[in-house]
Amino acid sequence: MNRRRFLELLGVGIISLHPYLQTGDWDIESPAVTAMRQRIETVIGGLNMALDFRCISGGLDEAFRLQVNAFNLMPIASCFKAWAVLYYLLHTPAEAQDMTQYSPVYQMAVNSDNLQTGVVLDDVARRVTGRGNAIEKFNDFLTITIGMANGLHTWNWPGSPTAGLSDPRFAPSEQRRVWFNGQQYAIDNACTAADLARGYDFLTRGETFTRAPELKAALQATRSLLSVPAVNYRSPIERAYPDGGYTGKDGILPSSDTPIGRVVNDAGVIVSGDHTYIIAFMSAGESESTAIDVLREVIRQMTAYENEISR
């Protein structure tokens, strides 16, 4: 999709990006992209994994989009916290914003503090007008402002001010169940890799196609915070891509927390040369080492593509 079409669909101000994501030219593959897709499909095979892998060119066109099981619902874990940062910045007066090391929003984004995540959602909801509890208001932001299709059902972390709140729109149901080994499971918070990638496209390209200075500043600050590495911890993508330059948020759940085993998710952005790569990876019931091996293959394919187009 070219820049002009993107601009026409986004318009100006803080509006949803999701319409442009429904159509485009990414299905016309070059031989290099076809080879890359075939290799990634082979590596993932029958594993319970999902991937949405996109490349944005220096001219802000979408160069390719590779999707494997990208529309399967999977446990989201903590990946949603990336957009809670933007939510906080857009609904908090500049003089009241605190993103220093020990602030709730920093602890949420960098150290994935679950209690502080509830504090952030509750704090922002008190400043957002209209009906709805803190979970519902955050989901409205995800679906209306960003254009994502999924939201949280609950955030019941013990001691969190959001404990006991829910959004029935995203409750587990026949339509919102996670499949694993041929069986359906009711998972409280589920999303798709395509939705995660959609959200990172907003964080990546939204700034260029808006005249709203508040959104520009908030997107820049969000990316900056999501680029801060945690102390003594590396996310799956950071382990697969040790060269640095990763901006994103992972989500890990131990096998004891879900009926389908360990959850290993990571989504974010890598800038390489003139290109920006969006990687949205989700995994459930597979080992962390297997997930990282798959991500390493994605990185190898990204490097091969860079080498191919630079010839």
Image (cartoon, rainbow, N blue to C red):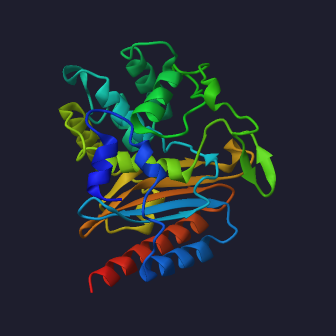
Picture quadrant of residue 159: top right
Q: Is residue 5 above or below residue 222?
A: below
Q: Is residue 242 left or right of residue 170?
A: left
What is the quadrant of the N terminus in the image?
A: bottom left
**Residue 227 visible in the shown view:** no
**Residue 189 visible in the shown view:** yes
Question: Which x, y percent locates residue 249?
Answer: 43, 48
Q: Is residue 212 above or below residue 223?
A: above
What is the quadrant of the C terminus in the image?
A: bottom left
Q: Residue at x 21, y 33 (%)?
A: 212
Q: Residue at x 40, y 61 (%)?
A: 238
Question: Which x, y percent locates residue 79?
Answer: 49, 45
Q: Residue at x 41, y 38 (%)?
A: 146
Picture quadrant of residue 123: top left
Question: Which x, y percent locates residue 306?
Answer: 33, 77
Question: Which x, y percent locates residue 47?
Answer: 67, 66
